Image: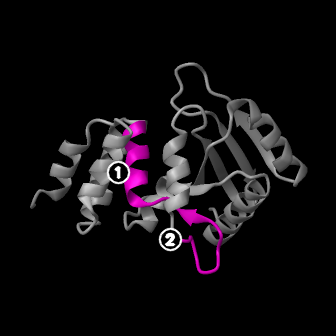
Amino acid sequence: MTNPDALLAAAERIAARLAGRGIHAVLIGASALAAHRYVRHTEDIDLGVNVAICDLGSVAEGLREAGYDVSVREPDGQDPLGGVIDISGPFGLVQIVNFGERFPAVIDSGHAEATLCVRLGAGLRVIPLPHLIALKLYAGGMKSKADIVEVLKRNPDADRGAIRALCRQYRLRGLEPLIREADAIE
């Protein structure tokens, strides 16, 4: 069983190491969903970044030199992600999910607009809800759509107009039925 405090501390250290290289990381995935009031089981922490795909190897090597066990999964031509770096250790698993050369703008603007920190005094910030929803729409699939519905249900006061505008800005489709489902009175 993963120790959540150790995992979060490792994610913060990894994000700080990335920041030292000029790479901004933001908390995404199930941990970000939890920060936005939708808790579902997860064993890892995902950090979203915007890195040139050709630089993944050097990022991974820098983490190896820092003592982490690292593996890189480079994207193929059909992959919506720009690769993933898995960092494992006694703390568990931290995944650096790269949107570079695929969907970098949402990570960059999400990092720039993020105000919620993972914990008091931490440098690692949580991606804002509209950006998280945009990432989920981009990912597609039933699980991502279900995540959108559930996080919207738990955030009835979230600015639906801002969420719509951001998704329109990125030309993402399929949001309206999910908003209707989330806002339906049960």
Residue matched to label 2: 116
Mark carried by residue 147: 1
The answer to whether one can see residue 43 in this image is no
Badge count? 2
SS at circle 2: loop
> Looking at the rendering, in which quadrant would you find the N terminus?
bottom right
Classify 184 as above or below 107.
below
Residue 20, given in percent of the width and then of the height, sits at 79, 58
Mark 1 → mark 2, Cα distance in angstroms: 20 Å
Q: Residue at x 72, y 35 (%)?
A: 72
Residue 183, located in which quarter of the rendered image?
bottom left
> What amino acid does circle 2 point to?
Leu
Residue range of the region highlighted in magenta in the rendering: 117-138
Mark 1 residue crowding within 10 angstroms, few (<14) / some (14–19) / many (20+)? many
Residue 123, given in percent of the width and then of the height, sits at 65, 70
Q: Residue at x 66, y 53 (%)?
A: 94
Mark carried by residue 129: none
Name the side, left or right, on which 92 lies relative to 157: right
> Looking at the rendering, in which quadrant would you find the C terminus?
bottom left
> What amino acid does circle 1 point to?
Asp
**Residue 114 covered by magenta stretch:** no
Q: Residue at x 69, y 65 (%)?
A: 12
Name the side, left or right, on which 58 lies relative to 43: right
Q: Farthest bottom residue?
A: 120
Residue 171, located in which quarter of the rendered image?
top left
SS at circle 1: helix
